[in-house]
Amino acid sequence: MKPGRGEPNVGTGRRDVVFEAVRLMYGGCGVSLAYEGSEANDARQCAAVKNELRRLIDLMGSAGRSSTISLRLSRIGMDVDEGLARSHLEELIREAAVYGMSIMIHAEEPHRSDRALAVYKSVAERYPTAGFTLQANLQRAERDMADLLPFSGRIRIVEGKLPLAVKDGRADSAEAYLRLAERAIASGRPVSIATHDESLLREVGRRGLLAAANAEVEMLHGVRPDFQQTVRSVGRLRVYLSYYGRLMV
């Protein structure tokens, strides 16, 4: 699973995504919900994104279902002011916790990685329901993993923007992904293996990682539903659902 735009979306509003999320959860899947919307370039727009995410949390919470809300720190203020992003993030974490829901910080572009990790670390000790996404194909991934391990929130591992077949001076990127997954799972932290690469998932299964109580596979809504059923037969599945709505400023 690669970060950025292009994820299949469920509909044009939060009610669409919540309806589908509840259906999936009744079927035994975990869900991760995201509001993509338009860019947020100033404090007013960032607050509007935060408010939309809060409405999503409240609507999903009223359905009586635990889930994860996935967000990009750059859309709730990180490019404007890190303190603003931290304040918005803490508000959303607290609101989600009321319903037993968690927050997942999405992958950002590499030039934002240091700031995103700094914001996460500033709240992670006080809010263990916040998780962070690692991009396996970045040179910094092993170092970022070391920074994350002292905390207790979920670690989500995505492939990154480069294909897994590309070599970057380390070992093959697929092997780098597997090393990160093994290290994260061995730590006892909850781990989401977010990929659609069948050969990679077969190797994850062969190594026994899907049998771990703290591991799950995350896949995009609507992508390879046949293969998602195969994943569910051997481990836990989380489905990532997103929607694109007009930003209410």
Image (spheres, rainbow, N blue to C red):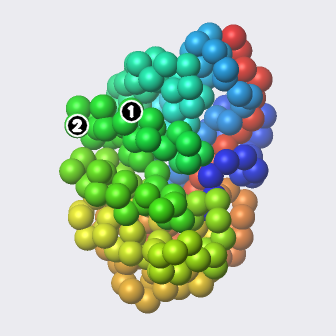
Label of residue 119 in the image: 1
Number of residues whose C-alpha sits closer than 10 Å to that of mark 2, classed few (under 14), some (14–19) or many (20 or more): some
Q: Is residue 221 left or right of residue 128?
A: right
- Residue 27 appears anywhere in the view: no
Give the number of the mark in front: 1 or 2: 1
Instruction: Work out whether residue 44 can be spotted.
Output: yes
Residue 23: image x %, image y %? Answer: 61, 50
Q: Nearer the viewer, residue 61 or 152?
A: 152
Give the Cα separation between the discs numbered 1 and 2. Answer: 12 Å
Q: Mark 1 vs mark 2: which is more N-terminal?
A: 1
Question: Residue at (59%, 45%) from the top-left corner?
Answer: 109
Q: Is residue 228 above or below residue 198?
A: above
**Residue type at the position of mark 1:** Val
Residue topped by disc 2: 125
Foreground residue, 169 or 76?
169
Left or right: residue 11 compared with residue 197: right
What residue is rendered at 69% in x and 75% in y?
226
Circle 2 SS class: loop
Residue 244 percent coordinates (x, y)? 74, 35
Tell me the quarter of the image containing the N terminus. Answer: bottom right
